[in-house]
Image: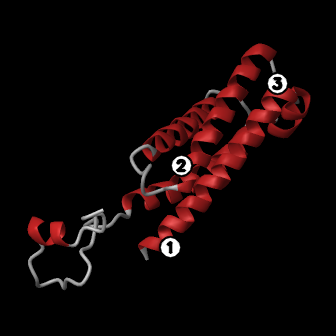
Amino acid sequence: MIVDKMKYLSITLRLMALYMMVMGVFAIFFQDAAEFMYLFQVVDPITTRMWGGALVGLSIFYLLASYDVEKYRLLLWAGVLQLTVSFLLTVYHMGTRIIEPAQGMIRMIVTPIFLIILLSGILSHKKEKVLFEVGGKTKGEPQGPEQIREQHPLQGK
């Protein structure tokens, strides 16, 4: 079951990377199309391009983390923080009428889905981690440093 969750977490991170990359590229290069696509009005093009650059950086982070989810498990909490802040800011902006409900609907749907999948993948981890196995030993036999030194593959080379 854990392998399946890691596989789904990797796929989710790649989808998040794709989503962030598309948003970032449109914010940097195609601001008129981004206004139409995301239903927002660009007030300052420079700030929007900087925001797009941050999104591209996040997409690279998610993409790199997707290749070895187990190794970057602790760094994925940054993604949880980013998604939580994005969701809360969208709720705040919709509540204060800074944006219309139609403008925030994509984020209100996509963000919680990514957040739930990301949290379920992060929180499902193995109870114990096998660092190495000594060949030919069973679980009941002692595996002290003497046995490890005797069977080391580089010994005598």
Mark toward the viewer: 3 or 2: 2
Nearer the N terminus, badge 2 or badge 1?
A: 1
**Would you name the residue on which mark 3 appears?**
41
For the residue marked with disc 2, what is the amino acid?
Ala
Please identify the quadrant where the C terminus is shown.
bottom left
- Residue 123 or 58: which is nearer the viewer? 58
**Would you name the residue on which mark 1 appears?**
4
From where the camera sits, is residue 89 visible? yes
Give the structural element (helix, strand or loop) at label 2.
Answer: helix
Marks 3 and 2, how far apart at CA = 32 Å
Check whether the beta carbons of the residues at disc 3 and disc 2 lie within 8 A of each other.
no
Please identify the quadrant where the N terminus is shown.
bottom left
Query: Relative to 44, is 40 above or below?
Result: below
Nearer the N terminus, badge 3 or badge 2?
A: 3
Query: Relative to 55, is 46 above or below?
Result: above
Residue at figure coordinates x 80%, y 26% from the top left: 28
- On the image, the x and y values in percent for residue 48 come to 75, 21
Please give left or right for residue 124 compared with residue 97 in the image. Answer: left
For the residue marked with disc 1, what is the amino acid?
Asp
